[in-house]
Every structure is written in C-alpha cells, then in structure tokens.
C-alpha cells in the first residue's frame, strides 16, 4: 500500500470503550460517570466505542445480511432503486458514485440510503423540504425493508439516549437536547467496499477523508476493518472493529454547537483486507427547524461564539453545497 494511505495501529487505550448501560441507571452518579467519560472522548478526537448499547445482535445481523444480499445482486437489479430516481436522495448509489475528498478519484464503494419514512402527503414532503420523502425499497427482497426499519428505529432510540449522555457531559440538564431530538432527521447508509485494488489510482480510497455533517454517527463495521481517523499530528490511525460495540463519532453540528470544544475529526476508509468490506453508519442529524446556537458554558466570559445561530436544515444544506456544489 502506498505510504500516503498507510496508518499506524492504535493502542487499545487510545480510543476509549464507553459502557453506556449506565445512562439507564436510576442512580444519577452512575449517569454522571458516563457523561464524564463522554466528555473526555469528545474533547479529544470525538471518536469512541460504545458497549452495552442495548441493540439486539439479531437486528444487527439481519441488517448486515440483507445489505450483503442486496449488493450481491446484478447491477441492473440494484439500479431499479437508483437514488437518481428519488427526489430526496434515497436508494442505491453505484460504485464510484461519490467523491468525499476533493481532488481525489471517486470513492471505491457503493451504498444505499434510507431515511425517515415520510409519505407523499406529509407537510415536509409537500413543501419539498430538504431530504424529506419516501424511501425506495428493493422489489426483489421482501425481508429488506422490515430488517432496515427495525434497525433504523433501534439506532434512532440509541442516538436519543446518547444525546442525554452528551447533555450530562456538558454539565447541562439531561433533557437539554430533547426538543432537538423530537421528530429528528436521520439517515441509515449501507456501504459495500470491494478490496482496495493493487493498482488503484493515486490517492484513491474506499472512502475519502471527510467529517460528518450532523450530530452523531453510530457505525457498525464488519471484521475486516479499514476505518482510519486522523490524529492531532496529521497521521492516520486504525480504528479496528471490536465485538459488540459501535464506533461513535461527532459531526460538524456538535462541533459548531459547542464552539469547537467538542471535535469533529477527519476520517476515511482504506479496505486493505483483501476481502469485501461492509459497514452500516447511522447519521443522527436532529429536528430540521431546531435553532443551533452556542451552548451554555461553551464560550468563556467575553468570548464571542465562533458561529451565528443556524437551523439544523440550514446547516445541513450548507454542508451539502460545500461538498457537492
């Protein structure tokens, strides 16, 4: 592998594994301890593992299996639900269909987008609100939709629970983000990475270096690894899969909200395993009309916030414009 794509191994202690079961404890001291662990991770790289998250293994396995079966179909069958057919960015994205890192070749991955299921007569859909509408579902796979909807709902609930931990981490009331979570936008992506070819184009990767746009990303990844995170010195470190965990990272919205106190860190995927790689990230973005302004305690006395207030959807639209033009 070229030197530019190499990464060093991460000591297991570099990225913390946070047991989030304590967020459901009736003891406020236990919940506060989880908040303290989250705070330490969020001011460092904004990347950490969570364990005892409560998502049943069966739901994860069903989603992964259906994703693998979908991507294993002929290209013509996958194109029946091409996201080019959707007005709200839902459905299949072909291999090399995205460039996440400006100035690099297209990403060596294919994907499938699933969002909040909104009918055509929903007020947001009627108004053609950004990224709002019905999903596309593969007609050949009867088990695909129920598997993905169960997984989506479980990750949505887990994301809401984690925002309560984030509130504690910032010394805010536990329910501080509840209004932000009410009727929140979220996106589930299924991703398939072929093995990194030996003669790939210069600087071509499975997924180019980028930060995530929203609040939280919860990632399931298979045993093949490939996720890399940029360290403070600009080098890249591996984030290996750990059994029964999700990788969580903060997005640009949280960095903005906390006045830069919490980190949204560059990351990428290089599938050097020699095998097919599958991952399923869940992006939790928040209620579209919620106004995000510098949080209490995130600006020192006399310090001006780095950013003016903005709604969630305005932030998201601006991120899309910067990335996709």
Image: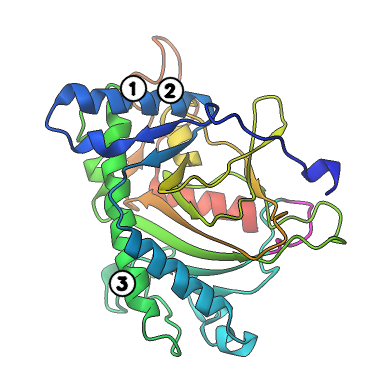
Is 105 included in the stretch rendered in magenta? yes
Residue 39 x %, y %: 39, 24
Instruction: Please give the residue where the numbered disc 2 appears in the rendered image.
Output: 40
Instruction: Please give the residue where the numbered disc 1 appears in the rendered image.
Output: 36
Image position of 267 with respect to 325: above or below: above
The residue sitting at the top extreme is 301
Q: Residue at x 58, y 84 (%)?
A: 73
Q: Which mark sits nearer the N-terminus, 1 or 3?
A: 1
Q: How many marks?
A: 3
Which residues fall within the magenta stretch? 102-108
| Left or right: where 304 falls relative to 229 | left
Residue 309 x %, y %: 40, 36
Task: Decide which of 53, 316 is in the foreground and name it.
Answer: 53
Instruction: Please give the residue where the numbered disc 3 appears in the rendered image.
Output: 118
Q: Is residue 286 visible?
A: yes
Give the secondary structure at mark 3.
Answer: loop
Which secondary structure class fits the magenta region best? loop
Give the secondary structure at mark 1.
Answer: helix
Q: Residue at x 28, y 46 (%)?
A: 160
The answer to the question of whether label 2 and label 3 lie on touching residues, with beta carbons closer than 8 A, is: no
Task: Decide which of 270, 164 is in the foreground and name it.
Answer: 270
C-alpha gap between disc 2 and disc 3: 37 Å
The part of the image, by quadrant, that contains residue 125 is: bottom left
C-alpha gap between disc 1 and disc 3: 37 Å
Give the class, few, some or many, for how many residues have Cα within 10 Å of label 3's Cα (few <14, many ≥20). some
Image position of 320 with respect to 177: above or below: below
Q: Is residue 127 visible?
A: no
């Amino acid at each position: 592998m070229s030197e530019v794509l190499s990464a060093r191994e991460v000591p297991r202690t570099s990225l913390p594994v946070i047991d989030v079961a304590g967020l459901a404890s009736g003891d406020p001291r236990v919940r506060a301890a989880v908040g303290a662990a989250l705070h330490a991770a969020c001011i460092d790289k904004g990347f950490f593992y969570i364990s005892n998250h409560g998502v049943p293994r069966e739901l994860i396995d069903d989603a992964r299996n259906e994703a693998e079966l979908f991507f294993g179909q002929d290209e013509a069958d996958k194109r029946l639900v091409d996201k080019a057919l959707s007005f709200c960015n839902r459905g299949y994205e072909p291999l090399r269909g995205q460039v996440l890192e400006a100035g690099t070749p297209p990403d060596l991955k294919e994907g499938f987008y699933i969002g909040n299921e909104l009918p055509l007569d929903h007020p947001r859909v009627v108004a053609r609100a950004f990224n709002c509408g019905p999903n596309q579902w593969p007609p050949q796979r009867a088990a695909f939709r129920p598997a993905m909807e169960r997984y989506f709902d479980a990750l949505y609930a887990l994301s809401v629970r984690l925002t309560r931990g984030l509130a504690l981490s910032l010394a805010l009331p536990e329910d501080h983000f509840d209004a932000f979570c009410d009727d929140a936008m979220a996106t589930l992506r299924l991703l398939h990475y072929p093995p990194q070819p030996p003669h790939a184009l210069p600087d071509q990767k499975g997924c180019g270096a980028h930060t995530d746009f929203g609040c939280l990303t919860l990632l399931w990844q298979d045993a093949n690894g490939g996720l890399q995170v940029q360290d403070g010195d600009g080098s890249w470190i591996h984030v290996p899969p750990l059994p029964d965990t999700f990788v969580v990272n903060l997005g640009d919205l949280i960095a903005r909200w906390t006045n830069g106190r919490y980190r949204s860190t560059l990351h990428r995927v290089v599938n050097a395993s020699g095998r097919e790689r599958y991952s399923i990230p869940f992006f939790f973005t928040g209620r579209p009309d919620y106004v995000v302004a510098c949080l209490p305690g995130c600006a020192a006395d006399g310090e001006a916030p780095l950013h003016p207030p903005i709604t969630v959807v305005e932030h998201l639209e601006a991120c899309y414009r910067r990335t996709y033009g």
